[in-house]
Amino acid sequence: MKNVLGIINLHEHEELLSTLTGHRPLAALPFGGRFRLIDFILSNMVNSGIHTVGVLTKHRFRSLIDHLRSGKEWDLARKQDGLFILPPPDHIHYSNSIYKGDLEFFYNNLDFIRKSSQEYILIAGSQIVCNINFNDAFRFHLERGADITLLYKTERPQPGRTFTMATLLNLDEDGRVADMEIKPGQIAGGNIGMEMLIVAKTRLVEIIQDCVARGQFDFTKEGIIRNLRRYRIYAYPYSGYMARIDSVQSFYRANLDLLKPEIWESLFSQDEPIYTKVRDEAPAQYCEDAAVRNSLVANGCIIEGRVENSLLFRGVRIARGAVVRDSIIMQDSIIQSNATLDNVICDKEVCISSGKRLSGDANFVMVIDKRRVV
């Protein structure tokens, strides 16, 4: 897919994740012990043979730039092509600015799109966690003679799992999109759009210019849904594991899914690995009284207490007598002696004091803000 330009569109719905994204974009949200959400789509693009990727930023992107740096970990630190951070329009930096929609940001970086040497563009967000090779979807796009190809997964209803602000697709027998709808409320299943699409560069430029000229700035609603009859829009089915991070609860559930061996193996394939920023640390240290069961523990952790059905990110310390169950403890957090956590998410560098008892619920998890001392 050397003839495909990747664009990661970070204009995503974060309203139900505000406790975790107040100081970072969704793309920079830690996941799975040592990754960030953007690692998955960026690695998928690179593993598919895409060597030029632009990241369309919105705001609060300092931590994202710190994570991506030159793109070296994804083999994108190149003299030609490579990784590009695409900034928002200047007025977006001011607090009184009005956010119109993501097409304003596409339009602001139209020169980057036009000057790229690739003829096709793959656009994707960061909220979908999966391991996908896009080559089959690209072949599908070419064989159908499609103007736009959307990627989707058919999700059957499961207890306790819903999707928010999801795009539902209605398809005809040939796989062409007959109708699309963005559901603002919670839905249990259906043909869920993966916020990924393939389009020819000339067609994308045409859509951007036409919409902006009419004062339309929502790419999905006004660039795609309003053009269902005008363009040949098809949908490609994906059948592998997918998690859609659209709320605190979905983030919590997707992390705990990694404790299931079959999901871990499908997501972190040796043939198509997920890359991330390297942080060299010593292996996790299990002290004499440590008791760890069904948990994922990253390097740099020191464990003296009990950990059950939980994820510990890099550099976490669990003191003697502390108990952590069904929880997510992010990087460099400290759980002091005799503290107890059940169904809790601790953001980075949190300190839970000795003897504290924090308890959420499997359906309403408790979140502790970054650097908070409890």
Image (cartoon, helix red, strand yellow):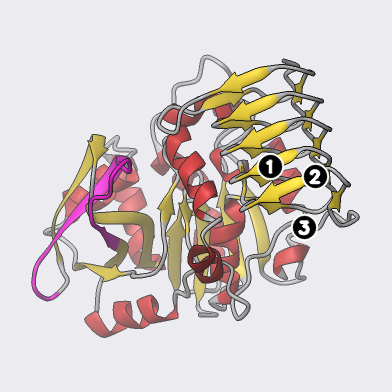
Residue that sits furthest to the front in the current view: 289
Which is more N-terminal, label 2 or label 3? 3
Whether label 2 touches label 1, CB < 8 Å: yes
Residue under label 1: 307
Is 4 situated left or right of 348 in this image? Answer: left
Mark 1, Cα crowd under 10 Å, few <14 / some 14-19 / many 20+, is many
Q: Using the numbered discs, state the Cα–Cα distance from disc 3 to disc 2 in whole angstroms.
A: 39 Å
Q: Residue 290 carries which label?
A: 2
Q: x, y percentage for residue 165?
A: 31, 38
Range of magenta residues: 153-174
Q: x, y percentage for residue 10?
A: 51, 44
Q: Using the numbered discs, state the Cα–Cα distance from disc 2 to disc 1 in whole angstroms.
A: 8 Å
Mark 3, Cα crowd under 10 Å, few <14 / some 14-19 / many 20+, is some
Query: In the rendered view of the protein, which quadrant contains the C terminus?
Result: top right
Residue under label 3: 70
Q: Classify 103 as above or below 236.
A: above
The residue tagged with tag 2: helix, strand or loop?
loop
Instruction: Let me know if residue 337 appears in the view.
Output: yes
Q: Residue 350: name its quadrant.
A: top right
